Image (cartoon, rainbow, N blue to C red):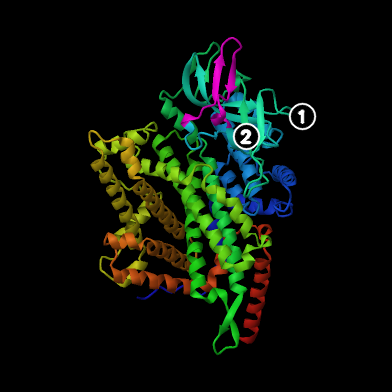
Amino acid sequence: MDTPKTPADFDRSELASLLDGRWAHVRDQVRGSLAEADLSPGDELDTEAHRARTLDQLHQLVGSGITGLGFPLSHGGQGDIGGSVVSLEMLPGNLSLMVKAGVQWGLFGGAVVALGTDRHHDRYLAKIMNLELPGCFAMTETGHGSDVQRLRTTATYDPDTDEFVVHTPHEAARKEYIGNAARDGRMAVVFAQLITGGEGRGVHALMVPIRDDAGRPVPGVRIEDCGRKAGLNGVDNGRLTFDRVRVPREALLNRYGDVEPGGAYRSPVDSEGKRFFTMLGTLIRGRISVAGTAGSAAKLALRIALRYGDARRQFERPGTGEETVVLDYLAHQRKLLPLLAKSFALHFAQEELVSTLHDMQNSGDERAQRELESRAAGLKAVTTWHATRTIQTCREACGGAGYLTENQLPQLKADTDVFTTFEGDNTVLLQLVAKGLLTNYKDQFDDLGTIGMARFVADQFVGAVIERTAARSLVQRLIDAAPKRDDENEIFDRGWQLELFEDREKHVLDGLARRLRRATGRDADPFEVFNNAQDHVLRAARVHVDRVVLEAFVAGIERCGDPRTAAVLDRVCDLHVLSTVEEDRAWFLEHERLNSRRAKTITEAVNALCGQLRPLAVDLVESFGIPDQWLTAPIATGAEARRQRDQREHDLTGG
């Protein structure tokens, strides 16, 4: 096996520019405008002081000008949805601030923009942007977290007063874990079952005051503090209960459903199920933001661990009298470098996702919207799990030093842990992805539930159709050029790699369809059929996301204008692909996509790639351009100084 050689260096500015991507101007704006601001996390403070600091920092963000990015130009914003998502990615060192900003301007403000009409925009948007009106996004309930369509809070229209009566009928309908509710929120976008004339109209959202100008709960609203959490304690999560709270009819966010005086209901969307998913689809920005910020947190953890590993020495190298740099050990490289490679892959996938979100504003293309929702769900799940794994691995790679609070990794771990279950539980999200793959977005729409999907697959599914990403022409060209011989070196051929991932996805999807079809007889319980295949469902979604991420990485490399930098990225991509195959080699062996000799060759290749990329590892992670203010860990800041000192000594002595 001849492993392709990695250049000894690359143009770091070229790579940084490539990674900054389409929203480089936003990234630069955040780096510049916030460089002198005190945005340091307050994790050492008590809960109340931490929350107070985070709110003060939120006001500092208002002064930076970035908080209006995602709001319409007509109301003083910048109309840049993609930029608003990217701006949150730039706050990985203070995740309480990031989450609170996301609640205020992404969820609360975003809901008013997406679900409201001019009367709401004119009244509220300026106050939301400048933080005069702090708000909440009150969707999740104690008894219904992921199952939003069946939440229990009600909003009943009273024609005698032309008001809605918002009510929590029992404890399970209490709004739970609501950001900004416990301390700072003045108003909430409340999701409730709309009832007019005694008839349920499905879930809608209303603007409901929860505190008066003095900060006291308004009559009928009970507010409880969720209390201390494992992380993100600068965010004031609370519980909201409504006891027949009355709001005017105009409080209904009425873009997709409205109630006229007297109670007549009208909507531009006929189907209740379609209306529900159309409404939720407009709020997808929050899910994409979580994926991007989780990816940034993983990059920050890798920056700490790689800097430390590049300077820390342990155990003497025989015959030299010198201790060995920890990152020179293959075991250490294998811990960190495949995770670094995956961070690159996910970065390009996130950029592609954000671009799609931005370009699809008000497009009206239902199929494209469904695909965007599916891709956002899958990438959010995979990226947040990647962050959890990466941060833990980085903590271990730094030994006891990584366990010290001052070195940031414990807090990163605590703050990102909840990312796997908020903005959609990851397991539920992957089932959403699989649903889209099986139905192929053609014949059934969103009210096709678990049982309906099992029946649909049994009756109509005819085969897996692989929907390629925006890089489809490039991918097809590479696949067509892939070598057809059984050569050890073909594992480095990009077309072979792409075809391998595509073939795995198609095989898993076809197998899932056959499994569901066989199990769904005349007397079968469709729920049990689908439930018994959930392992297969989740696997189908995971391998689909793997393929989408790889295609995005390949497209990113294609955009690189410097040949040496592109060559380095090629090797990073090889490491990502082959380490992914190595992790799943049982499947590839069981399904005869690899033989035992090829599997061993892939392990050898991963080892070789780790060794080649090791000298470039620190420069690679630095190229992500995470603002320096977020790197405070002494083991990383001190490690960088030692690395530069060692390099100067090396240059002076000639090695």
Residue ID at (48%, 14%):
198
Name the quarter where the N terminus is drawn: bottom left
The kind of secondary structure element at disc 2 is strand
Eyeballing the image, is 537 above or below 306? above
Residue at label 2?
239
Which is nearer the N-term, disc 1 or disc 2?
1
Say what amino acid the circle numbered 1 marks. Ala
In the shown orientation, is residue 129 left or right of residue 107?
right
Mark closer to the observer (1, 2): 2
Question: Is residue 254 one of those drawn in magenta?
Answer: no
Q: Residues within 10 Å of mark 1 (few under 14, many from 20)?
A: few
Eyeballing the image, is 376 above or below 13? above
How many numbered circles does the render carry?
A: 2
Say what amino acid the circle numbered 2 marks. Arg
Residue at label 1?
214
Question: Is residue 160 one of those drawn in magenta?
Answer: yes
Q: Which residues are magenta?
A: 149-174
The x and y percentages for residue 277 are 45, 32
Q: Quadrant of residue 591?
A: bottom left
Q: Residues within 10 Å of mark 2 (few under 14, many from 20)?
A: many
Foreground residue, 332 or 353? 332
The kind of secondary structure element at disc 1 is loop
The x and y percentages for residue 323 are 59, 82
In the shown orientation, is residue 425 left or right of residue 232?
left
